[in-house]
Amino acid sequence: MQADTPSRAFLTVAEPQLFVADIRAACDFFTARLGFAIEFTYGEPPYYAQVKRDAARLNLRCVKQPVIDPVLRDREELLAASLTVATAAEITQLAEELGFRNMWLAEHHFSTYGLLARPLMYALHLANKTRTIRVGTAVIVVPLHHPLVIAEEIATVDLLTGGRLDVGLGRGYQRYEFERLGIDIGESRSRWEEAVDIILLALAGKPFSFEGTHYRIPETTVFPHGVQHPHPPIWVVAQSLESVESTVRRGFNLLSGGNGVPLERLREFRHAFDRHVAIFRPVQQLHVGIQRPVYVAESEAEARAISEQARWNMRVTLSLRGGYEQVDKGRAIPVPPPTEPSTEEFLDTYSVIGTPDVCIQQIKRLQEAMKIDHFNCSFWFGDVPQDKVLASMRRFAKDVMPAFR
């Protein structure tokens, strides 16, 4: 990428788009203050190839030139991040238009596996760009933050969204993230238990104090107070039997089934869930949901091709969970696990990818395995172009959703 004069900057917007305000702000910044031509690096999912295609779709002129200066690469990173944020906004707006109920946002740090370090901040951004869809965190990694700060941010976003916030909480699984924040991942469960106690006390809106192993809090009251009382709906992403038990014991909703979790494991989670419900007898009925990569294809051949994009996410997830991750200057590398499912097995067991009839069948299998009443569609994964993501969402709403109404 090579610097150029502001008068020759190659960033323009030809016509309005669904989320053109975000792009125009980025373009104005680059054009007026920096001024340069941009090289987009190819074939490095899910980042630069996606940016190049989205820029072309938004009528941004992109000129390929050699990268000669690390400082200029920082500017490329900034534009890439701006386009990524705007792309997610477009997905959310279309989801609302198509009748989806929720938009979920994950928290990740220090690699291109995820670009949202503060999902509550972006949830508020998306709420400001929509009218009815609920926005949620899946999840806030609780042990990485002070629980009083989490409670304050939850209450603030709940207030500013008018009560459209759902809260997903998680214990975290990436040693890579914990190490860089100076936190022992071996303490994650004990930190989680104390922190959740504090968050619930804080969101109740009354003065409280707390004395624990990790946190000692003198009498404290958290402001502001949120709209939903005593707090927004709370979900926990549980990927272990211990987490399923903790979720039911606290009366939280359960979400599971992310990358690399097979159908047999989900059945184990449901059996454990039912056992613990019988023991703890929650006051309110608990909701159960599953997340899967979703793509409604026009043909079997397209489904097989798209499945390799979802495999990228699964490889990175499993490597970060298993501690054999490779991150090069922030780039998450899709390291294959020791044993990996074939394309047929991946499509059959780990995803909802296929023609509409196949997707309906796969979701019904998930319903049977875990008796879900919530299905979280991960439409945006790997290096799938944005126009294909949006087309898949439209096919899902038209051809798949009616089978479950």
Image (tube, grey):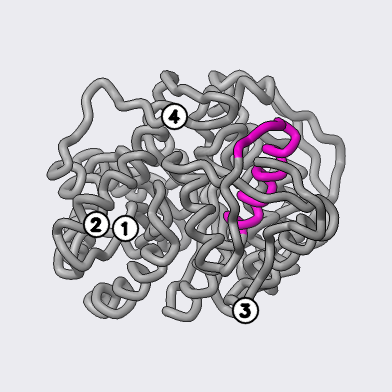
Up/down of 166 relative to 260, above or below? below
Q: Give the residues in magenta.
A: 66-85
**Amino acid type shown at disc 4:** Ile
Q: In which quarter of the image is residue 346?
A: top left
Q: Do the residues labelled 1 and 2 touch (CB within 8 Å)?
A: yes
Q: Where is residue 29 in the image (x, y as percent from the top left)?
A: 79, 58
Q: Where is residue 134 in the image (x, y as percent from the top left)?
A: 55, 69
> Circle 2 sits on which residue?
353
SS for dot 4: loop
**Amino acid type shown at disc 3:** Glu
Along the polypeptide, which appears first: circle 3 or circle 4?
Answer: 3
Specify whether residue 323 is in view: yes
Q: How far apart are marks 3 and 2 (CA)?
A: 34 Å
* Label 4 environment density (alpha carbons within 10 Å; few <14, some 14–19, many ≥20): many
> Circle 4 sits on which residue?
333
Q: Disc number at residue 15?
A: 3
> Circle 1 sits on which residue?
294
